[in-house]
Image (cartoon, rainbow, N blue to C red):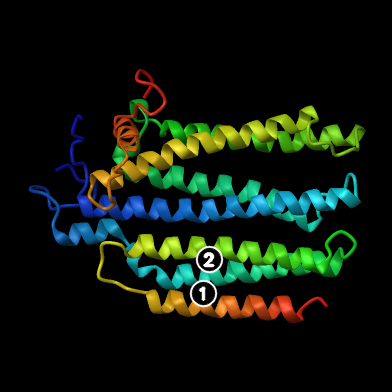
Amino acid sequence: MTLPKGFGSGGGGAGSADVEKMIGRRVENMTGMITASFIAAWLATFGGTAAGYFVYPWAYPTPSGHYAFIVLTIVEAIGYLFCVKVMEEGTRKNSNGIVGGVLGGVTIGTIAIVMFVGH
Amino acid sequence: MAQMPALLPKEVEIQRLKKIWLVVIAMGSTAASVEVDNFVDGSLHQTSIRDSAFTPAHWWLYSHFVALPLGWGFVAIYDRKVPVLRGPNNSMNTGLKMTVLGYLATMFTIGVNEMWHFWFVEEIFAVPNHWMFNMGVVVAFMGALAYVVRVYARLVELGAETPGENPYVAEMYKMALEGKLYSRSIP
């Protein structure tokens, strides 16, 4: 096997140390980063829609902003779920608890925002 | 099917393909969210005919025109670590080339659009300066789809994903792996 420059010891193929070095951080260990990104995206979505109905209320009635916020939350949640599932398929890692907790929290947060913000 | 020579360990290749896949999912979510923005923007233009670039609907629309090319640019750079995804003569993957060209056309049209609206204020969907926006995005999506199919087909070949049961889908994966998704003569 031909290895890129800097890998291997000259003869023979890749050892497990070479493989680890070539992989970098494994995708199944990226749950924290992806969860943080999802929450940041969700908060940014709230910020964007809130800017709409607070700054431009004649163009964006609050119900429209909330509708967009709900639909986008669903879109983002599906993306988040797919990311974690793709990362962990074929491994023994399991983050169902984290994903369930985050999605549950985001659901409650979305309902609370829609009920109490912007009225 | 010609067997690709193993240029890097299978485990490494799967991890790299999955990293590309994660970026693709994130960009897919972004693109789906902009579908919502089409309605938000449309509702805004019911009340103001030609507004500024700095309304919330436009933050969203224009920032996605920045986010997706950046994402594909990242993929194009990272893609060099996966030899099977290279295009003809070790150039960039053909699907990625189409994607980058499509978004370049879209970016160019942002300038054209501003120039047009300097004289013609009304924001009508079918005006010529909007054509290249839409055509650029369509070309970008076509290229992206071909690239994504190729990544997925390679993940299937490496045993990291389940093969398609539908024979037409299986044939599409096979052609993607042979670099013949567009035609049998142009890789």
Res. B74 in view: yes
Nearer to the camera, B162 or B50: B162
Q: Residue B24's spot in the image, x, y percent? A: 47, 50
The picture quadrant where one finds residue B152 is top left
Q: Residue at x 31, y 32 (%)?
A: B171
Nearer to the camera, A113 or B10: A113
Q: Residue at x 72, y 30 (%)?
A: B131
Assign a secondary structure to mark 1. helix
Q: Residue B48's spot in the image, x, y percent? A: 90, 50
The picture quadrant where one finds residue A43 is bottom right
Q: Which mark is residue A115?
A: none
Q: Residue at x 25, y 70 (%)?
A: A92
Mark 2 to mark 1 CA distance (whole Å)? 7 Å
Position above or below: B53 against A87: above
Tell me which amino acid carries mark 1: Leu
Quarter the C terminus of chain A occupies: bottom right
Tell me which amino acid carries mark 2: Ala
Res. B58 in view: no
Nearer to the camera, A53 or B4: A53
Which residue is identified by label 1? A103
Q: Chain of mark 2?
A: A
Q: Residue at x 35, y 37 (%)?
A: B169
Which residue is identified by label 2? A77
Assign a secondary structure to mark 2. helix
